[in-house]
Amino acid sequence: MNFLCIRSLSILSFFFFLSVSLYDCLWVICLYCMRIISFLRLFFFFLWRLYLCVWVCLVRPCCVLFITLIFRAFRHWSDGVGWFMSAETK
């Protein structure tokens, strides 16, 4: 009788510790998932900042410069054409 009671208690304690260890494993997995998610958020935040920095410092000024040069060239070309046309008509 005493042996069966000890045996049943040892089985119960095994399942109890197994459930606690499973709970701990799930808890650790959740913590690591939260760490990974926070790292990804931080990574994408810095990636977005890098994109904005590149856009503001490189791409936008180059686009503005390119558009300005095109308009100046067109204005110079149109002035030349206008001068040519006016000289021909005189």
Image (cartoon, rainbow, N blue to C red):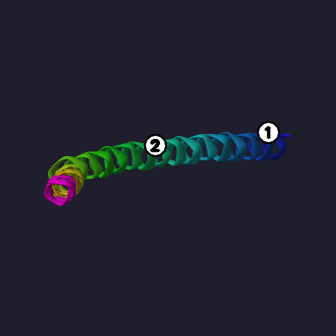
With 25 as the anchor, is 8 left or right in this view? right
State which tag comes first along the sequence, 2 or 1.
Answer: 1
With 30 as the anchor, is 5 left or right in this view? right
83 drawn magenta: yes
22 or 62, which lies in front? 62
65 or 7, which lies in front? 65
Identify the mark at residue 31; answer none if there is no mark: 2
Of the residues shown, which amino acid type is indicated by label 1?
A: Cys
Q: Can you give x and y, in whole percent of width and height, for residue 80 in the image?
A: 15, 59
Identify the mark at residue 5; answer none if there is no mark: 1
Of the residues shown, which amino acid type is indicated by label 2?
A: Leu
Quadrant location of the C terminus?
A: bottom left
With 56 as the anchor, is 16 left or right in this view? right
Instruction: Identify the image quadrant of residue 54.
Output: bottom left
With 33 as the anchor, is 7 left or right in this view? right
Which residue appears at 80% of the width and 42% of the height?
Answer: 8
Q: Can you give x and y, in whole percent of width and height, for residue 57 in the image?
A: 15, 52
The span shown in magenta is 77-90
Q: Can you give x and y, in whole percent of width and height, for residue 42 in the image?
A: 32, 45
Which residue appears at 66% of the width and 47% of the height?
Answer: 18
> Which element type, helix, strand or loop, lies under badge 2?
helix
52 drawn magenta: no
Label 1 neighbourhood size at 10 Å, few (<14), some (14-19), many (20+)? Answer: few
Name the magenta segment's main secondary structure. Answer: helix
Outermost residue toward the front? 90
58 or 79, which lies in front? 79
Relative height, residue 16 to residue 65 (above, below): above
> Which element type, helix, strand or loop, lies under badge 1?
helix
Contact check, label 2 and label 1, Cβ < 8 Å: no
Identify the mark at residue 16; answer none if there is no mark: none
